Image (cartoon, helix red, strand yellow):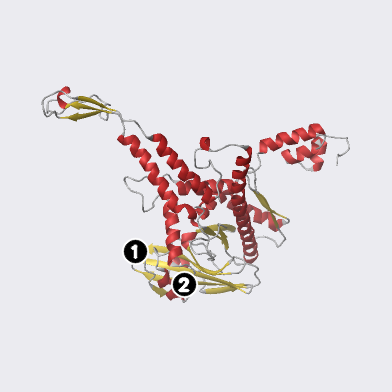
C-alpha cells in the first residue's frame, strides 16, 4: 500500500527547486505566482528575524514571531477537543490527543506563513502527523469550498555526492485520491535531476509508483489556512500571513526601535579627558581604572592645556518611544489585535466602551481562525479514520469530534463568575446550575453536591 508515507519536507519555493522546472518535470501547473512566492518568503524571513532590512544598525523587534505567537495563544487558549462514540473513536482520540499537544506551536507556524497541511501517516501501528508548512507545500488546485485537491510534496536526502529527491503527487477528484511517487537523482541540492526507479533508494523502495483510493469524502491531507483575505493577489485561495498587511510597518517599527537604541548608545555618558591624566604602564599604555573603560574617552591636548569635559547629553527617549508606539498601534489594528497587545498598554484609552471594542475586534479575528482550524482538525480526524480502516488499526465504528474554544478574550471570566454568584444570591440561577457551569459537573452530580429544593425561577 503506502508503506510508511512519512516525508521530511525540506523544500522551499524557488530555493530547493525552481517551481517552473518542477512543474515541467511533473507536467503540472503550480498555483503559486512569483508574487505570492516572494510574499511567502518575506513572511518567513520576518518570522525568523532575517528580513532584508536588518543589519548591524537596524535591529529586529521580533514582531513577526510575537504577532504569530500571540494569535496562536489566543486561538488555542484552553481548547478542549476529543473524539468519542465507539471503540474506534477511543483509538482515534489517543492519536488525536498527540496532535493537540503540538497544536499551539504548529498554529503559530501556520499563521506566520499563511497556512499548513496536516498530513497523517501510519508508523508502528500508530497514526502520526506531518506538519507541512506553507513554504514546503506546492498547491496546484483548489475546490470551490476551499479544499486543496491537488498538490505535491518534496522529500530530499543526500548520499555521498548525490541528492535524491522524492516527489509525492496527490490529486483528489470525484471521491478518489491518486498518489504518485517519483524519485530523481541530482548532483546539486537545488536541481531536481533525472528520474530513477523507487527501488534505487532503500528508504523509498517499499513505496508503490502509483495508487488510488476510492470512496473518499475528502482528500487525505488537510489544509489549514489563515482565513484573512489575500491582499497580495485578491481572489487567490492561498492563505496569507497574519501579519501580511503590516510587513512595511514592521520594517518601520524595527527602524524606529533601532533609532531608540542608538539614542541610548550615542548619548551614553562619557568623560573626555587628557591622556596625561592617567598613569602609564611599563609599555607606555594608559592605565584606565578597571570597569571605567566605557566612561573615559582619552584625547591628546593640542595646546598642552589639561582637558576635562563631561559628555552627558539630554536623551530624546520619549518622542522616539511615542513614535514607535504609534506604529505598533497601527500594526495591531491591521492585524486584528487589541490595542495594548504590542503597544504600551498605559497609553491605551481604557473606557469601558473602548476596551469592549478592542476586545471585540480581536475576538472576531480569533474566532475566524478558530473556525478555520476546527475545520482542518475535523478533516484530519476523518483522514485518521480512513487510515485506521486501511491499515486495520482498530475495529470499525462511528465517531464524533467535539471541540470547545475559549472566548475569555471577549468575556472576562472572573467578572462573569461574580455576576453568576450574584444571580444565585438573587435566585435567578440555581446553585446546581452554577456548579454545572463553573465546576464542569453533570446535572446529576451538581444536584447531589448542592441540593436545591426551591422552584426554578423562569
Residue 182: numbered disc? 2
Q: Does 232 sit above or below residue 317?
A: below
Q: Earlier in the sequence, mark 2 or mark 1?
A: 1
**Which label lies toward us, 2 or 1?**
2
Q: Does 173 sit above or below residue 237?
A: below
Residue 98, position as x, y percentages in the image: 59, 51
Residue 62: numbered disc? none
Q: Is residue 75 something one can see in this rendering?
A: yes
Residue 160: numbered disc? 1
Identity of the residue drawn at 49% across and 60% down: 134
Residue 157, position as x, y percentages in the image: 41, 63
- The C terminus sits in image quarter: top right
Q: Quadrant of residue 267?
A: top left
Whether residue 246 sits left or right of residue 291 in the image: it is right
As drawn, which residue projects farthest toward the bottom? 27
- The N terminus sits in image quarter: bottom right
- In-front residue for pair 164/270: 270
Q: Does 308 sit above or below residue 167?
A: above
Residue 343, position as x, y percentages in the image: 49, 41
Whether residue 90 sits left or right of residue 265 in the image: it is right
How far separated are the C-alphas under marks 2 and 1?
Answer: 20 Å
Whether residue 309 sits left or right of residue 245 in the image: it is left
Residue 111, position as x, y percentages in the image: 52, 54
- In-front residue for pair 165/25: 25
Whether residue 129 sits left or right of residue 410 in the image: it is left
Identity of the residue drawn at 47% across and 48% down: 65
**Do the residues bearing badges 2 and 1 touch, measured as CB atoms within 8 Å?**
no
Label 1: which secondary element: loop
Amino acid at each position: 500500500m503506502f508503506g510508511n508515507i512519512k516525508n521530511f519536507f525540506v523544500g522551499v519555493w524557488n530555493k530547493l527547486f525552481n517551481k517552473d522546472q518542477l512543474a515541467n518535470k511533473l507536467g503540472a501547473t503550480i498555483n503559486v505566482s512569483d508574487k505570492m512566492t516572494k510574499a511567502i518568503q518575506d513572511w518567513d524571513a520576518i518570522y525568523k528575524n532575517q528580513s532584508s532590512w536588518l543589519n548591524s544598525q537596524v535591529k529586529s523587534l521580533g514582531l513577526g514571531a510575537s504577532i504569530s505567537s500571540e494569535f496562536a495563544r489566543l486561538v488555542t487558549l484552553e481548547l478542549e477537543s476529543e473524539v468519542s462514540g465507539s471503540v474506534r473513536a477511543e483509538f482515534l482520540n489517543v492519536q488525536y490527543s498527540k496532535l493537540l499537544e503540538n497544536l499551539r506551536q504548529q498554529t503559530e507556524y501556520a499563521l506566520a506563513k499563511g497556512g499548513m497541511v496536516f498530513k497523517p501517516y501510519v508508523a508502528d501501528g500508530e497514526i502520526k502527523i506531518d506538519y507541512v508548512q506553507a513554504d514546503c507545500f506546492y498547491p496546484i488546485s483548489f475546490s470551490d469550498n476551499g479544499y486543496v485537491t491537488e498538490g505535491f510534496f518534496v522529500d530530499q536526502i543526500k548520499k555521498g555526492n548525490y541528492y535524491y529527491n522524492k516527489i509525492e503527487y496527490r490529486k483528489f477528484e470525484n471521491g478518489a485520491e491518486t498518489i504518485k511517487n517519483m524519485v530523481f537523482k541530482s548532483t546539486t541540492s537545488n536541481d531536481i535531476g533525472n528520474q530513477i526507479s523507487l527501488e534505487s533508494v532503500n528508504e523509498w523502495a517499499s513505496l508503490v509508483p502509483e495508487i488510488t483510493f476510492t470512496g473518499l469524502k475528502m482528500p487525505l491531507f488537510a489544509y489549514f489556512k489563515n482565513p484573512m483575505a489575500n491582499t497580495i493577489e485578491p481572489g487567490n485561495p492561498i492563505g496569507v500571513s497574519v501579519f501580511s498587511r503590516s510587513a512595511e510597518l514592521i520594517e518601520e517599527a524595527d527602524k524606529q526601535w533601532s533609532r531608540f537604541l542608538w539614542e541610548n548608545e550615542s548619548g551614553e555618558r562619557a568623560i573626555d579627558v587628557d591622556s596625561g591624566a592617567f598613569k602609564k604602564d611599563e609599555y607606555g599604555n594608559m592605565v584606565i581604572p578597571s570597569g571605567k573603560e566605557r566612561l573615559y574617552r582619552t584625547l591628546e591636548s593640542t595646546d598642552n592645556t589639561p582637558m576635562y569635559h563631561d559628555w552627558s547629553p539630554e536623551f530624546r527617549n520619549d518622542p522616539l518611544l511615542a513614535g514607535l508606539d504609534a506604529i505598533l498601534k497601527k500594526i495591531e489594528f491591521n492585524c486584528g489585535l487589541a490595542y495594548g497587545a504590542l503597544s504600551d498598554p498605559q497609553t491605551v484609552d481604557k473606557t469601558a466602551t473602548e476596551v469592549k471594542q478592542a476586545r471585540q475586534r480581536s475576538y472576531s479575528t480569533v474566532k475566524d481562525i478558530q473556525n478555520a482550524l476546527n475545520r482542518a482538525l475535523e478533516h484530519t480526524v476523518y483522514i485518521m479514520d480512513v487510515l485506521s480502516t486501511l491499515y486495520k488499526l482498530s475495529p470499525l465504528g462511528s465517531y464524533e469530534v467535539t471541540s470547545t474554544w475559549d472566548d475569555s478574550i471577549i468575556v472576562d471570566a472572573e467578572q462573569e463568575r461574580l455576576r453568576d454568584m450574584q444571580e444565585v444570591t438573587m435566585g435567578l440561577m440555581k446553585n446546581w446550575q452554577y456548579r454545572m457551569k463553573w465546576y464542569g459537573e453533570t446535572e446529576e452530580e451538581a444536584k447531589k453536591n448542592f441540593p436545591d429544593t426551591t422552584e426554578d425561577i423562569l
